[in-house]
Amino acid sequence: MSRRHPLRRFPSALMAWRNLGRNRVRTALATLGILIGVVAIASLGMATAAIQQQATANLEGLSNEVTVSAGPDNPNDGISADQVDDIERLAGDATVVPERSNVTTLSARNGAETRVSVTALTKADAMYNVSRGSISNRLRSGALLSQADARRLGIEIGDPVTYDGKIYRVQGILSSSQGIGGQQRVLVLPLSAMDNQNYYDSVTVLAEPGQSVEALTANIESSFNTADEDIVRVRNFAFVQQNVGSFLSTLRLGLLGIGSISLVVASVAILNVMLMSTVERRGEIGVLRAVGITRGEVLRMILTEAVFLGVIGGVLGVVVSAGVGVILFEFLLGSPLSAFRWQSVQYLLYGMVFAVAASSISGLYPAWKAANERPVEALRD
Amino acid sequence: MSVIVLEDAIKRYHTGGEIIEALDSVNFRADRGEMVTIIGPSGSGKSTLLNMIGLLDTPTAGRVRLNGRDVTDFSTDELTEERRSDIGFVFQDYHLLPMLTATENVELPTMWDTEVDRRDRAVELLNRVGLSDRLTHKPPQLSGGQRQRVAIARALVNEPDVLLADEPTGNLDQDTGATILDELTRLKESENIAIVAVTHDEQLVEYSDRVVELVDGTINT
Ligand SMILES: Nc1ncnc2c1ncn2[C@@H]1O[C@H](COP(=O)(O)OP(=O)(O)OP(=O)(O)O)[C@@H](O)[C@H]1O
Ligand SMILES: [Mg+2]
């Protein structure tokens, strides 16, 4: 007794499978076309997801910040201690960091010089991250220096820097990926370093998760300013995030468009392959029709072949794209497994859906054509 | 009652402004248990006639009856259903599907009827035509005679009322042709079916119960 084929209950699938097995090279090439299309869509999609995640991570530090500085109608040359108290009251749970700033020239023992902006504040740990060294809440006599300047001046942890005649020891080097606002060239000192200034140059309010940055901004603005008097200037960076977000979605659409073109090319290849193979099998399909296989059954059989090409190409494409995704995320974000978050893994699904849809659509015409061939004609030659 | 009847069947082809009358008022019938052979010179309309009988083509004028029912005006899909349930085909070039085993080829006409399993009947038919040891072989691994026997088994899998054969021995040598014809004769009786064959083969004519000669699209009596 011959054994039953597992696909026996699905005759269209069984026949499609056997037919694809007849010309392996052609099947492999058609599959490869689909595979490339899927990889194009999925990996471009995942690349934008990676860029997006990176941008979000970079913007995160900014997105909860509200910055208050003196407005044009402020009687003083900055924010007064009383005003800081007012802000503190309005801010609720948010951390309020008043700071004074200046510019100075740092020089190294080897004679190199560089100009940096100087920020004097308390609560440095709320505002900055270090890549080396540490930050204590109050810097006391410690300082933080941006990485680029530290490198340029050859300054290491523990080395002294001089500001306004006083010596501070560098206790931390700021990490370079400190967001778009950029701690590019900055020396961070304890607030006491600028005690000679009466006013604060700016006050940063760090909103707690759940606190609305927009509401905080509006609150502070309305309690200090009136319609014709701008005592303070209040800014937040929510708009930056919005702009970056909309740029990224444009980028994503563009890249996905490019990816889709390759899938369109692949489906034209499938159309060609299916047309060729149905023309070659014209007589055979005539026999099927003669012995009583209906047009609908022939149509389903050939359509199934096209769908199989799409599914095989799609699955292989998804496997390859997952690999590409892992490499991309490792490269761009340093965390390969982030590739499997929905934000990026969804593109694998889209690639698969596109592959199956594109190949089914390309299979329609050849299938319809083969099914409607008159068996008498097909059998004549 | 005759299995298949053609009444005043006319078939015209229009080619390049010219009208070819391939069949001209042909009357034909075949009964269960008889083998009718259609002979005639090339171009006389034998294949055209067989296509009418096999419901692969419809006449330009005239009637076709299958088991007493007028099927002349049936739609493409209705005709397909009739072929599937009542008619078996054997072709000169066997026309087996190369990627299917002998058994699967025999099952082919009923393959899409998933609710009835014809596997057992397929195997039994292959036994009957002497291919019990070739069930899982594929056509390229079979000889011409073996292929034609698979084709005969395929033509019978749906328990047809009529089996149609266009030059069934055309590609076979004398001896193999004879075994095929013996096979057909036995099956004609055991299955009680009508066999209509088109041939140039004198040998086949000897096996038939009745011979119909076509000349220029008309039956020569
Ligand atoms: N589709 C068609 N279009 C035009 N003319 C056709 C068509 N089919 C058959 N004919 C013509 O009809 C006539 C009969 O053809 P048919 O194929 O029935 O002959 P035949 O008796 O089977 O010949 P042979 O013994 O060579 O197979 C021929 O003149 C042929 O050219
Ligand atoms: Mg002929």
Image (cartoon, coloured by chain):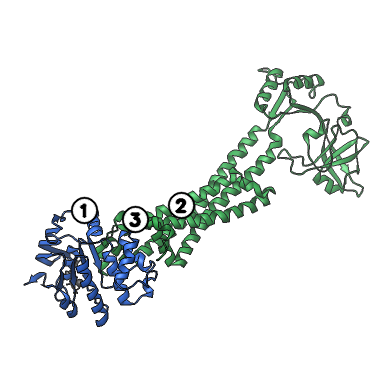
| Distance (Cα) linking label 3 and label 2 | 17 Å
Q: Amino acid at mark 3?
A: Leu
Residue identified by numbered label 1: B75
Q: Amino acid at mark 1?
A: Ser
Q: Under tag 3, what secondary structure?
A: helix
Same chain? Circles 3 and 1 = no
Which shade of the palette goes to chain A?
green
Residue reaching furthest to the left: B221
Mark 2, other Cα within 10 Å: few <14 / some 14–19 / many ≥20: many
Mark 3, other Cα within 10 Å: few <14 / some 14–19 / many ≥20: many
Q: Quadrant of residue A185?
A: top right
Q: Position of residue A158 (x, y in %)?
A: 90, 43
Residue identified by numbered label 2: A356
Q: Under tag 1, what secondary structure?
A: loop
Residue identified by numbered label 3: A299
**Drawn side of residue A12 relative to residue B220, left or right:** right
Q: Quadrant of the C terminus of chain A?
A: bottom left
**Drawn side of residue B53 relative to residue A270, left or right:** left
Q: Quadrant of the N terminus of chain A?
A: bottom left
Chain letter belonging to callout 3? A
Q: Quadrant of residue A380?
A: bottom left
Q: Amino acid at mark 2?
A: Val
Chain letter belonging to callout 2? A
Q: Residue at x 20, y 72 (%)?
A: B185
Is residue A179 visible to the viewer in this orientation of the structure? Answer: yes
The nearer-to-camera label among 3 and 2 is 3
| Distance (Cα) linking label 1 and label 2 | 33 Å
| Chain letter, colour blue | B
